[in-house]
Image (cartoon, rainbow, N blue to C red):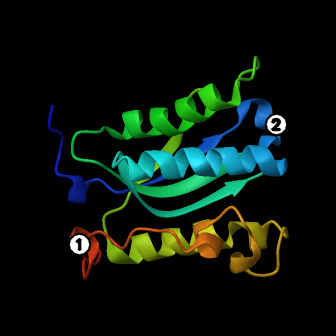
Amino acid sequence: MRLAPQETRTYFVTAITAERRRLFQVTATAELLQRTIFDYRSQGKFLLHAFVIMPDHFHALITPAPDVSLEKAMQFIKGGFSFRLKNKLDVWMRSFNESQIATEEKFTNCVRYIEENPVRRRLVATPEMYPFSSAARGAKDPTPLHLVGKTARA
């Protein structure tokens, strides 16, 4: 199955824990989600342009692989994490929020929003200080070529 070209499918996604439990306040749990995200990224399931793991949710800016739907990419992350966690309780709210990114400006704004989230929540003084974020990890894929130089139409 071949979906729309990868370079036309970049999304800002948010997933929230069930009952807004602060699962990722525990370092080992946040590290497990981070490893899960990186494992699927290294398997080529999606490009990871930015991410942050907050105490009760995560944000990511991803471009699914050509043969992977956005829903499947999120299933890899959420389902893969839940399987690895081996918890009897529900881990995630059923759905996730998504917004398709169509311009370089929106892409840049999303990266900033994601990486500054821990600062806005007063968890750290600077984005680079928060360990569960692309700002601290520096591990992120570049801006997709289809967005470079693309601006919103007036």
* Classed neighbour count for the residue bearing mark 1: other residues with Cα under 10 Å, few (<14), some (14–19), many (≥20): few
Asked where in the image residue 10 lies, by quadrant, the reply is bottom left
Question: In screen coordinates, is 21 left or right of 79?
Answer: right
Question: In screen coordinates, is 3 left or right of 20?
Answer: left
Q: Quadrant of the C terminus?
A: bottom left
Q: Which mark is residue 23?
A: none
Q: Is residue 27 visible?
A: yes
- What is the distance, in whole Å, between disc 2 and disc 1 at their CAs? 37 Å
Image vertical order of residue 109 relative to residue 76, above or below: below
Residue 108 in percent (x, y) is at: 45, 76
Instruction: Give me the residue at 84% from left, 47% from top.
Output: 26
Question: In screen coordinates, is 94 left or right of 88?
Answer: left
Q: Which residue is mark 2?
A: 21
Q: Quadrant of the N terminus?
A: top left
Image vertical order of residue 113 relative to residue 154, above or below: above
Instruction: Give me the residue at 53% from left, 48% from top.
Output: 37
Residue 153 in percent (x, y) is at: 24, 75
- Amino acid at circle 2: Arg
Front residue of 120 and 75: 75
Instruction: Give me the residue at 74% from left, 70% from top.
Output: 130
Q: Is residue 13 visible?
A: no
Label 2 close to label 1 by CB (< 8 Å)? no
Image vertical order of residue 120 relative to residue 5, above or below: below
Along the polypeptide, which appears first: circle 2 or circle 1? 2
Residue 73 in percent (x, y) is at: 41, 40
Q: Which residue is mark 1?
A: 145
